[in-house]
Amino acid sequence: MKRGEKIAHAGMRGEDIRSDCYIEIELRDSGGIAPDVSSKVKSMYGFSITEIIRTMCEFFELENARIYLEDNGALPFTLAARFEEAVKKLFPDSAKEYLVPVHKNNEDSTSRDRLRRSRLYLPGTEPKFFINAGLHNPDGVILDLEDSVSPQEKDAARLLVRNALRAVDFYGAERMVRINQLPMGLHDLNYIVPHNVHIILIPKCESAGQVAEVEKEVNNLRKRHDVSHDIYFMPIIESALGVMRAYEIAAASKNNCALTIGLEDYTADIGTRRTDEGRESFFARSMIVNAAKASGLQAIDTVFSDVGDMEGLRLSVLEAKSLGFEGKGCIHPRQVKVIHEAFAPTPEEVERAKQIVLAFEDAERKGLGVVALGSKMVDPPVVKRAQKVIHLAILNNILPENWRDVQAS
């Protein structure tokens, strides 16, 4: 390896830092490996921390170095990422990757039509948010490499996100990563595709060609790393041009599973201010819904940015639901429960849907070509909508899967 600097550091330090660490590596001509660990939990975990340091020194072939670690509760996946970041600063041409073990719960796959009511954004350089994110029961977590990460921290975020995909238990939440805007985002794929990501969010998407670029690179990496599970895409529309090309983008790949919109960038692009009423974005959001539905995708709404306004969030979700959206972004864990409850079918909707579905199934058994509910004829689109309400009610644990048997008894 060609050496760059003689001393390098990585990570975060300070009184407010938690679940992270600061590491400094100074290369020497002799003296072997000299770890210097400062940690509040040194008495309990000092030996384990030192062993991780020595293991990584051996892996990266460091023979003589002073290594100072200031630990603030960093888990092994974070310590490993910070150590590797410092090594890559010392040896910029190094291609070696220290891959932490894969958690047993991170070997699962996902499906194209999975429930995606909520997706919780987690800044890619903040491992403190990764650890307990799944406990809040979001349908998905988004490990973010884009807007929440400053330009000078991009490399650090890639390593942290890669290790999190492998080692952090998200308790069944779908594992999503928002890559950077292309072309930088293509480089990000090296750090996520081989490590069992479920969905790749493509930001500021303005053409089918951008989706094709991502798909081509994903396929190359899947082949190179023998990745067999499906990886889906969620393009994010964030400009006037993207809105006008929404259907083209939605239909660009069989691996697209959903289409979503980012209103902060969109409203800036059209020269207006985002409001709670949303009149300035009604056209754009309607375009997203129609493009998604025309392509057989889920339509996912933007985030609600006021984390203290739960009633405003609830009303925003109900409005999104009325437009045809099936999910919404979250920027704080407390938003998850409100979003799930607001997207769930109401008791009145469920009861009406049950009556329609039962009437439809009775008509089928009798070989009738029309469905009647009382004195009213029920059109096929109404039946289809009722079946979807039943499906959502089951997914939301409002109805048991054997609801027909319960109804009969």
Image (cartoon, helix red, strand yellow):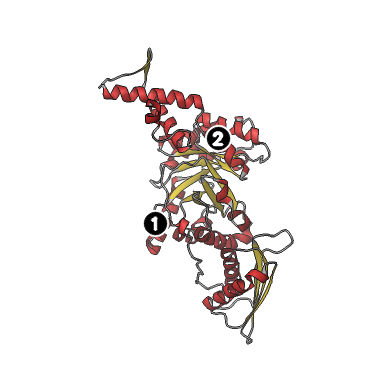
* Type of amino acid at the residue the image marks with label 2: Glu
* Type of amino acid at the residue the image marks with label 1: Asn
Question: Residue 395's image quarter?
Answer: top left
Name the residue tied to disc 1.
219
**Looking at the picture, how far across and down is residue 29, in whole percent?**
63, 86
Taking depth in this image into account, of 140 and 407 the one nearest to the observer is 407
Q: Is residue 40 left or right of residue 359?
A: right
Do we see residue 380 in this rendering?
A: no
**Looking at the picture, how far across and down is residue 118, in whole percent?**
54, 42
Taking depth in this image into account, of 283 and 383 the one nearest to the observer is 383
Q: Residue furthest right?
A: 15
Nearer the observer: mark 2 or 1; the answer is: 2
Do we see residue 355 in this rendering?
A: yes
Question: Residue 298's image quarter?
Answer: top left
Specify the quadrant that holds the C terminus.
top left
Q: Residue furthest bottom?
A: 30
